[in-house]
Amino acid sequence: MRALAAGSEDALRPLYARYAPIVFGLAAHSLERAAAEEIVQDVFLSVWRSAHQYDPARGALRPWLLQIAHYRILNELRRRSRRPRLAPRSRGRADRSARQPRARALGRCVERVPP
């Protein structure tokens, strides 16, 4: 982490190799694959940017990194819950009556098609 905090890009590779599958698995429990992959990228970007804030005296690296992942996943779930949802289309009487003229027109067109 000291090398990462000093700006060494090479220091991120072993961290990514070791912890990316764990972060992905955690994210994939709550999100679809594409979102879980984005979470992994976001977590490691955050680790890269905040490496100087990591203090080994306060705890091990793994819990610190997984806490970042946990909050990123929660934020994504919160963001999704705030998104308005569209009501499913009704299959009631109004919907059927709207389809009838189209169905009749389609039937007339099919009748005109030569055998």
Image (cartoon, helix red, strand yellow):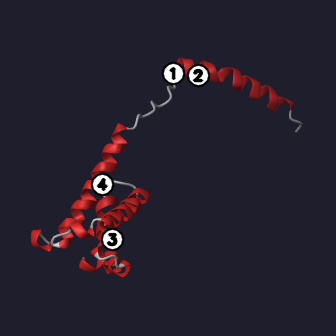
Q: Is residue 41 above or below residue 115?
A: below
Q: Secondary structure at mark 2?
A: helix
Residue drawn 50% across the image and 29% down it: 89
Nearer to the camera, 99 or 56: 56
Nearer to the camera, 11 or 22: 11
Q: Secondary structure at mark 3?
A: helix
Looking at the rendered structure, the kind of residue marked 4 is: Ile
Q: Position of residue 70 (x, y in %)?
A: 25, 57
Looking at the rendered structure, the kind of residue marked 3 is: Ala
Label 1–label 2 contact, CB within 8 A: yes
Q: Which quadrant of the figure has residue 71?
A: bottom left
Decide: few, some or many residues near mark 2? Use Cα within 10 Å; few <14, some 14-19, many ≥20.
few
Mark 2 or 3, nearer chain start? 3
Q: Is residue 105 above or below residue 83?
A: above
Q: Secondary structure at mark 1?
A: loop
C-alpha span from label 3 to label 1: 48 Å
Q: Which residue is mark 3?
A: 20
Decide: few, some or many residues near mark 3? Use Cα within 10 Å; few <14, some 14-19, many ≥20.
some
Q: Which quadrant of the figure has residue 37?
A: bottom left
Q: Position of residue 18 (x, y in %)?
A: 30, 77
Decide: few, some or many residues near mark 1? Use Cα within 10 Å; few <14, some 14-19, many ≥20.
few
Q: Which residue is mark 1?
A: 92
Q: Which residue is mark 2?
A: 96
Mark 1 or 4, nearer chain start? 4
Decide: few, some or many residues near mark 4? Use Cα within 10 Å; few <14, some 14-19, many ≥20.
many
